[in-house]
Amino acid sequence: TTTTTMVATLGTSGNGTLAATADICEPMGSVTGRRGDDLAAMLYTSGTTGRSKGAMLTHRGLIANGRALHAIWGFGADDVLLHGLPIFHVHGLFVALHCVLLSGSEAIFVPRFDTDTMLAHLPEATVMMGVPTHYIRLLDDPRFDAEKASNIRLFTSGSAPMTESVHAAVAERTGLAVLERYGMTETGIISSNPLDGERVAGTVGYALPEMEMRVGTDAGPCEPGETGVVEVRGPHLFAGYWQLPDKTAQEFRADGWFVTGDVGCLDADGRLRLEGRAGDMIISGGENVYPAEIERVLRAVDGVVDVAITGTDDRKWGQVPVAWLIVDNNRYDPAAAKEALDRELARFKHPRDWHLVDEFPRNALGKVQKFKLRDTDPARDT
């Protein structure tokens, strides 16, 4: 039996919530049989690079992903999940809850992520799943420490990249290394750093059981260390995009591999490092520029709170990088940022334009919506 602790009622005065609706429904008297390839749910993609699409998820895919995660993350009946994720997304609705349901464990369900609420319940939990912005907000509070997290056995993070500095800060503060993983609405979780083993900051680990993963180009699979687009195949995959058959066909190779649109590379033993979205790649003077590479360098500069790299048209080079930064004005030195780029990256990868902003446009899971940044670039039409 699964126990769910309702910390607060969702919605305005409880209206429109699942719990409120359940109270007025008649009990179900029967169970309708379904096949593995029947549609179980349709979730819309996050839309960080453009239009959201309805991903049709099957019973087989959800079961395969849930069972794999339940096994590799070591869930048991004694676990207690602190759940502060939105449940209109695959992360909160399936990734988190399936681990709880399959183990018959407890979930502390909070209505939204709030630092005070999360810290109040953290000592009761054994697992917390979050996104990088959640951990950043916790780190901003001195109460987030090893004592507060003494009962936690597992922190996971996904839905957006976690910087190596945040990864290190959580480990220093709590004594626990965050387990980063990688997934999509269309696939569920694709890869994960190991529960037992080295969790390498900036990487998203190894393919899940029954999930095949490779990096390739239109010419074929890449060798270890070579950069390409991540492709996956296996029972976890979705059945296609709702009412978009041409788009569905476009995203699959002839041999059944799904092209994720995420750029990365595999090391010799199969560990994946992501470099960003293929749609975000900048082609400058015929050279590929991956925003994540520039972002990693700039995030290490003192005073840089966060950074996003986009591309803009350029008459000479075709495209050039543009830097968008959130900074601490008391510590940030523009010269130090440019010196770091000089040390680490070729000149064609240096941003042409620099914009200091107070915040980035983000979706509900904290992913930066770069297409909105590009729309506000004053040099976009020059």
Image: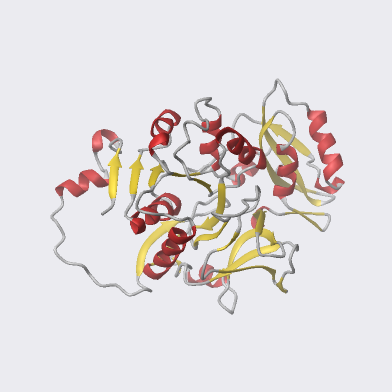
Compared across the picture, whether 93 is left or right of 132 comes to left
Residue at image point 72% right, 65% down: 268
Depth check: 291 or 374 in front?
291
* Residue, far bottom: 255
The N terminus: image quadrant: bottom left
Query: Looking at the image, is 361 positioned above or below residue 275?
Result: above
Depth check: 349 or 191 in front?
191
Query: Looking at the image, is 220 positioned above or below residue 271?
Result: below
Residue 278, quarter of picture: bottom right
Query: Looking at the image, is 6 positioned above or below residue 48?
Result: above
Compared across the picture, whether 273 is left or right of 86 comes to right
Q: Provide residue 253's location: percent of width, then percent of height.
A: 60, 75
Q: Provide residue 5's location: percent of width, then percent of height.
A: 29, 41
Depth check: 288 or 232 in front?
232
* Residue, far top: 330
The C terminus: image quadrant: top right
Q: Provide residue 342's location: percent of width, then percent of height.
A: 86, 40
Residue at image point 30% right, 36% down: 7
Q: Provide residue 244's location: percent of width, then percent of height.
A: 47, 67
For residue 381, say whether it is visible. Answer: no
